[in-house]
Amino acid sequence: MYDYQKVLKERIEESEEFKRKYEKLKGLREKEIKEFGLELVGEPEIGRVTLGTEGVLLFRLLRFGLFKELNFISGSKFANGMVYRGGIDIGRALIETDNSNNLDQFLTSLAELYKESEIGILSVIKKSDEFLVIRMDECISSAGMLNVGRAICYFEAGIIAGALEVFLGSYVDVEEVKCWGKGDEYCEFEINLRHISEEEVTNRRNIRESGEGRVHDRNVRG
Ligand SMILES: [Zn+2]
């Protein structure tokens, strides 16, 4: 299992500049977060300790700039939904499965896809025929961001959903339960693997995203 606290400690010990940035990030209060403006971009360097930050800042500016515009036009539920759907398309297109129905093999392929694309470091926390918990360290969207009170990794959740849909041949719902955006130091996704209809998936997302949307609307300037 990837040990963020261990690599973080080593990084802090080797660089005064890094230590200063880390303490600044940890010390920011709610008022300062709002004034900061780029709260969703955060400090990639803090969270991407092993995967690095090349291209990450540009990715986040595009990702969250686009989100803010979509949110301004049609609300956060629509904006999050579009980001999630974009992830689904990528997951469907990029996952490599050998049709063996072997869940372990599929999860290994998924972790390789995330690592090679430098999206994040995946590890399986819980696994049964019906339920999965997947942890993601060093997320390209959120690692090193401030606590904004909500999970934000709809893109990464969508990729997992799209890949799983190819593997399972049915719809799945991926819910992010831990996130840098909620004050955690990694992200975690819960996934129900039993067969559900597209309608049921949509209903669950609507309920969840509308709840988060109310929190989000207060944070976005527009
Ligand atoms: Zn996250």
Image (cartoon, grey):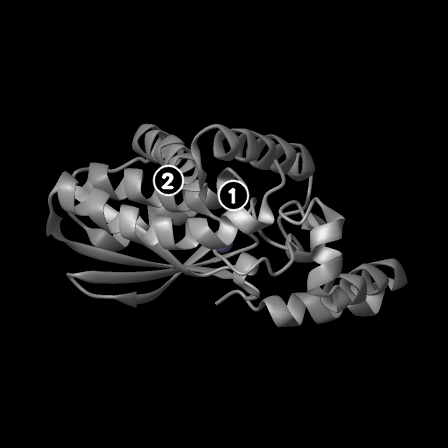
Tell me whether circle 1 and circle 2 mark residues in contact (CB < 8 Å). yes
Task: Using residue 196 as the reference point, say whether residue 55 is left or right of it.
Answer: right
Task: Using residue 23 as the reference point, say whether residue 5 is left or right of it.
Answer: left
- Amino acid type, residue under disc 2 in the picture: Ile
> Whole-percent x and y of residue 192?
21, 57
Identify the residue at horizontal 66%, vertical 66% (top origin).
7
> Whole-percent x and y of residue 135?
42, 61
> Residue 39, can we see it?
yes
Q: Secondary structure at mark 1?
A: loop
Instruction: Locate the C terminus by quadrant.
Output: top right
Viewer-closest of 217 and 38: 217
Labels 1 and 2: the sequence-earlier one: 1
Q: Is mark 1 within 8 Å of ligand 1?
A: no
**Image quarter for residue 165?**
top left
- Mark 1, Cα crowd under 10 Å, few <14 / some 14-19 / many 20+, is some
Identify the residue at horizontal 36%, vertical 41% (top origin).
158
- Amino acid type, residue under disc 1 in the picture: Ile
Report the residue marked by disc 1.
119
Viewer-closest of 105 and 164: 164
Identify the residue at horizontal 65%, vertical 34% (top origin).
61
Q: Secondary structure at mark 2?
A: helix
Q: CA distance from mark 1 to mark 2?
A: 10 Å
Identify the residue at horizontal 68%, vertical 50% (top origin).
42
On residue 159, the disc is: 2
Up the image or down, 73 lies above or below 158; here it is above
**Image quarter for residue 128?**
bottom left
Up the image or down, 177 lies above or below 54; here it is below
Q: Is mark 2 within 8 Å of ligand 1?
A: no
